[in-house]
Amino acid sequence: MSRRAMFIFAAISGFFLVAFGAFGAHVLNKTLGATEMAWIHTGLEYQAYHTLAVLGLGAAMLYRCNIWFYWSSASMALGTVLFSGSLYSLALSHLTFFFLSRQSGGCSSSLAGY
């Protein structure tokens, strides 16, 4: 993932983080239960951490280009989409077949990203 792609991903992820967080707090809070809101909160929390990490990697690549930064940022981006996305889909639709994507997203961002 190039520096430009890192910054674009961080911007889109940050926008979605704020928009979905506000939507969840004001609209979904009335229709979903406490368990589903906890899943959404967990997804938003981890998405925020990894968005900041990808943003930091993009800033670090402005000063030093390293192949490990590329792979780490790509892994974090993929892990964020898989992990947080599966939590959002589980909370909104109760579809359990996203279980494996949540596990692979967590492994991708945790093991390979860091």
Image: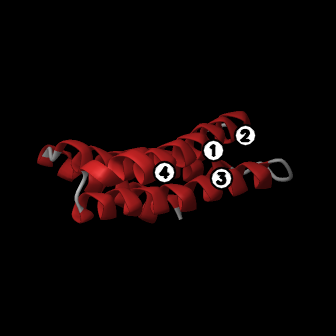
The residue located at (83%, 47%) in the rendering is 62
Measure how far apart labels 4 and 1 are at the Cα level.
16 Å
Residue 64 at what x, y percent from top left? 82, 53
Mark 3 Cα-neighbour bin, 10 Å: few <14, some 14–19, many ≥20: many
Residue 63 at what x, y percent from top left? 86, 52
Measure how far apart labels 4 and 3 are at the Cα level.
29 Å
Mark 4 Cα-neighbour bin, 10 Å: few <14, some 14–19, many ≥20: some
The residue located at (40%, 61%) in the rendering is 41
| Residue annotated with mark 4 | 21
* Left-right relation of 25 to 29: right
Residue 17 in sight = yes
Amino acid type at circle 2 is Arg
Q: State if disc 1 and disc 4 touch (CB < 8 Å).
A: no
| Residue annotated with mark 3 | 69
Q: Secondary structure at mark 2?
A: helix
Measure how far apart labels 2 and 1 are at the Cα level.
11 Å
